Amino acid sequence: MERKLATIQLVESLTPIEGADRIETAHVLGWEVVVKKDEFKVGDKVVYIEVDSILPEIPVFEFMRERKFRVKTIKLRKQISQGLILSLFDLGLVSSHSVGKDVTTLLNITKYDPQQLEEDKLLAQKEALHRGRIQKFLYKYKWYRNLFLKTKKKDKFPSFISKTDEERIQNMPKILTTIKENNILVDITEKIDGQSATYFMVKHLVKKWYQFKPTIEYKFGVCSRNLHLPTPTSGSYWAMAEKYNIEQSLKRLYICLPKETKLIVLQGENVGPGIQNNKYKLKEGEFFAFNLKIDSKKQNYESMYDNLKSVNPNIECVPLLYHNYILPETVHEVVELSKGHSLLNPQVKREGTVTRNNENNISFKTINPEFLLKFEEA
């Protein structure tokens, strides 16, 4: 599902900023956004544009030119501001639009996605092997890749696997009420800033014409966040598969599972040299698992850890920060909980947290605003 970068929302409250006479904080969903004082009223229907958004270069967004039209986390008078709030009138939208309506495409807003750029390069390198010298040169340029680079069917992310893209808590603040009312305990893990990788294995029976009985075959697959990478490459995805012997590990895991098990999916984060500027200052590439799915069931953290360690003690899981935890009641408190330093390197601020309770289908991420400000991320 494509991310809703721009939606119609309501201004739920306005709060003053200490020492500021001309600006105040507007609250939309679970987001806090600095706006001009008296520009909006509580209950106003507005367009909220999320961080990570790339805005079109049109007059209404001209004030964002110095920021290269990219919406990022900023701090004004010690107040964190995440996103933009604009009136429907300024954007040429009618007031009849319903709250929650996605206007991302209508406003020609796109997502800032550095991992997608890396994936484009992978495809470009692959396609360039079969092209002439001039085309190889042109493939360096994004506009040329956008025109001529098409994902082949076998390169598309498998439809039977869910992609790894958690929703931010600010977009689903009501989940905190559900958690409190039902006394749900959660596990909170560190969110690691790297490359999202998916490894899977499908078991199926194959009967050839010369055989009396079908034989079991295993198909191993490697994926980036958006692509299936069917053949080994020089990138980190296959490198981690080889380093941690993931194919054989998943095959060994089948032995421990019921015979009817058909699919195992292992998802995690690749980090290290050459990946996201190696923020954790690691000496070599490493893989940290955050999802283990057996057929249609996603394992909880404890089960994931035990299963993986039973077949390969070298595979690490993302650090567990809190187990069976009683979550705070407000988005602000949850965001505060995301702050701190990484367990991968205590000298580096952690990217944030991921909160889960798989039995109740609860899962969301919380990004540490201090991390975003430090590394000039969204």
Image: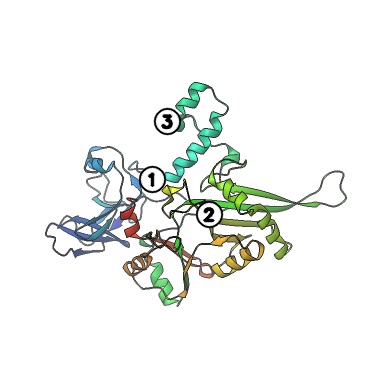
Distance, label 3 to label 1, CA atoms, is: 19 Å
| Rendered image: mark on residue 213 | none
Q: Is there any visible trace of residue 18 in the rendered image? A: yes
Which mark is in front, 1 or 2? 2
Question: Tag 2 or tag 3, which sits nearer the N-term?
Answer: 3
Q: Residue at left 57%, top 50%?
A: 240
Mark 3 Cα within 10 Å, few/some/many (few <14, many 20+)? few
Spatial CA distance of label 3 from label 2 is 30 Å
Q: Which of 73 and 108 is in front in this view?
A: 73
Residue at the spot of label 2: 286
| Dot 1 alpha-carbon crowd within 10 angstroms: few under 14, some 14 to 19, many 20 or more | some
Which label number is shown at residue 111? 1
User: Label for residue 141?
Assistant: 3
Amino acid at the residue labelled 1: Lys
Q: How crowded is mark 2: few (under 14 residues within 10 Å), some or many (20 or more)?
A: some
Three-letter code, disc 3: Tyr
Secondary structure of the residue carrying tag 2 is strand
Q: Residue at x 82, y 45 (%)?
A: 208
Dot 1 falls on a residue whose secondary structure is strand
Camera-side residue of 124 and 1: 124
- Whichever of labels 3 and 1 marks the residue nearer the N terminus, that label is 1
Callout 3 secondary element: loop
Q: What amino acid does circle 2 point to?
A: Glu
* Residue 28: % across, % down: 29, 60
